[in-house]
Amino acid sequence: MSDRTIDRVAQATPERVARKIRGLSDRAIAWIFISPTIFLLLAINIFPLIWTIQLSFTNYKANRIGREVKDVGLRNYERILTDSDTWLNMQATAHFLFWTIFFQVLIGFTLAWLINKKFKGNDLWTTIIVLPMMLSPAVVGNFWKFLYQPQIGLFNYIVSWFTGKDPSSFEMLGSVTLAPWAIVIVDTWMWTPFVMLICLAGLRSIPDYIYEAAEIDRASKLRQFFTITIPMVLPFLMLAVLFRGIENFKMFDLVVQLTGGGPGSVTELTSINLKREAFEKWRTGYASAYAIILFVTVFGLASIYVKALNKVKQR
Amino acid sequence: MSDFLTGLMRLRRGPWEMVATILIALGVFMLMQPFVLWAFTYSFIVTLIGTVMFIIVSHFPE
């Protein structure tokens, strides 16, 4: 008598169930195992998506259940894409996206390059640098709000120490010109370590013998940097840019905590605007069309991201 | 350039994915640019065409 677990399970299975399972093919059993996941996927992802697409062609309002729902065709899309306020929100998102990615790549790559040089305390510095990334965006938003306080905030005091300006003479979160930069600074502070880690992985994947060959050919350090380091890290950098681009396109929590979209609507990014349309103005149909526009954009960027990821994997 | 065009004619994945990627990037740029409203208006359709094209052409042979 065998004492293996599989035999014990087989013996413990009631005869009626065992007879049913014996009649099933391997393919059918595989489908039985994955069906709960497929069901959850359909219920949580696919069904809401299809429903949102359907709602985007109507004038449905979620706070007026009994109201007659009219089919408005493409009017919601037309209104969004010809609305100058939505265009301004897109521009605010573009400003945020461009500058955060620019600073994160610049600082992240520099940090990775420095960390890649072997020095004492290398690991400790890496741990310290990646700390901001581990924090919750809500926490980061709240404590940067304190740092930006004109009277007691450390940020204003540091700026005044460098520029000689009175700390209470400027307000980072209350000024129309400074608030867009305030959110860029916080996001850069939080997510530069992520870009640094990706760049570090890229730098560490470059074999030493390539640099040794370049040394033999008497290539200068600058030449090595531009002809070996940059081209070999580029796929990783592209990956970081796409990843941060997709994430920042959907940015909500950090900016809501910091400015709530204000002053006025200078920091009202598309996701904040979408939330206002859906849950403050209750224009569900309009907001659904808005969400579909953002979804298609993110989906398109994600397709490029997957392609870039495959290229990196092939290396 | 001729390889690229040949790839397009023979329905190869590489060049078609390139075209789709350019359309998506162009659509995203049109969506976020601060210069002309008409580009913003047509950005969605360009991104949508690029995205759908990407899904289709990713099934083309290498």
Image (cartoon, rainbow, N blue to C red):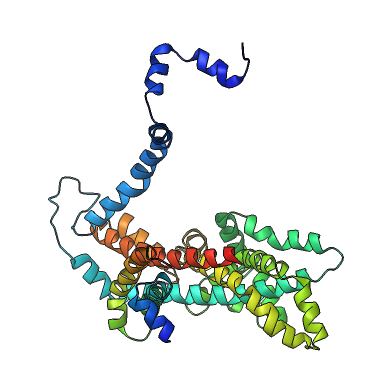
User: Which residue reaches farthest right?
Assistant: A120
Image quadrant for the C terminus of chain A? bottom right
Indicate the quadrant where residue A112 lies.
bottom right
- A120 is higher (above) or lower (below) than A4: below
Which one is in front, A10 or A62? A10
- A275 is higher (above) or lower (below) than A195: above
Residue, x 44% and y 12% (percent of image)?
Answer: A14
Image quadrant for the N terminus of chain A? top right
Which one is in front, A241 or A249? A241
Is residue A62 visible in the rendered image? The answer is yes
Q: Position of residue A19 (x, y in %)?
A: 39, 17
Residue, x 76% and y 69% (percent of image)?
Answer: A116
Is residue A261 visible in the rendered image? The answer is no
Indicate the quadrant where residue A287 lies.
bottom left
Q: How many marks?
A: 0
Q: Position of residue A134 (x, y in %)?
A: 64, 55
Q: Position of residue A173 (x, y in %)?
A: 53, 70
Which one is in front, A52 or A312? A312
Q: Position of residue B10 (x, y in %)?
A: 35, 75
Left or right, residue A265 beside residue A123: left
